[in-house]
Amino acid sequence: MELLVASAIGIMTAGGLYLVLRLRTFPVILGISLLTYAVNVFLFGSGRLTVGAPPILRDDVTAYTDPLPQALVLTAIVISFGMTAVVVMIGLGAFLGSDDDHVDDQPDDADKKADGAS
């Protein structure tokens, strides 16, 4: 179980980093979202991976799951949703303002000639 979760975290992190390093806005947004999913799974996995264990320690329970990582993941989901909405709006505004979705918008040859550069 731990190997599966660790592999999933690694694959999501690698995919997220690859997408963040792209030169288009939409893959960067997807990469940031994929990285937040990887962090959420990492936080959830830090609370011990036990199946069917209650999150609250009572007198008759011998094994339990730590509830703190679950609360952290719920908070991180809300924060990442808000962050994704803000980044999408910034990317949409940049696309509508320049008719291009490159992250590092290089000037075209026509723009260079108009500025007098060779």
Image: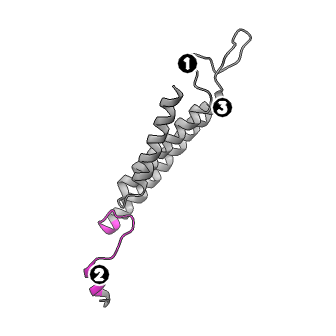
Quadrant of the rendered structure where residue 39 is?
Answer: top right
Name the kind of residue labelled 3 in the image.
Leu
Asked if marks 3 and 1 touch (Cβ < 8 Å), the reply is no
Residue 67 percent location from the top left of the image? 64, 27
In the depicted structure, whether residue 26 falls above or below residue 64: below
Tell which tag, 2 or 1, sits nearer the viewer. 1
Q: Is residue 56 left or right of residue 26?
A: right
Q: Is residue 104 magenta?
A: yes
The magenta segment: 97-114
Residue 58 percent location from the top left of the image? 72, 14
Q: Is residue 68 left or right of residue 111?
A: right
Image point 39% across, 52% down: which residue? 19
Residue tagged by mark 3?
68
| Foreground pick, 84 / 14 | 14
Query: What number is the disc on residue 111?
Result: 2
In the depicted structure, whether residue 75 falls above or below residue 88: above
Residue tagged by mark 1?
51
Q: Is residue 41 magenta?
A: no
- Secondary element at image label 1: loop
Tell which tag, 3 or 1, sits nearer the viewer. 1
Residue 62 percent location from the top left of the image? 69, 13
Ranked by sequence position, the earlier of labels 3 and 1 is 1
Image point 35% across, 73% down: which residue? 106
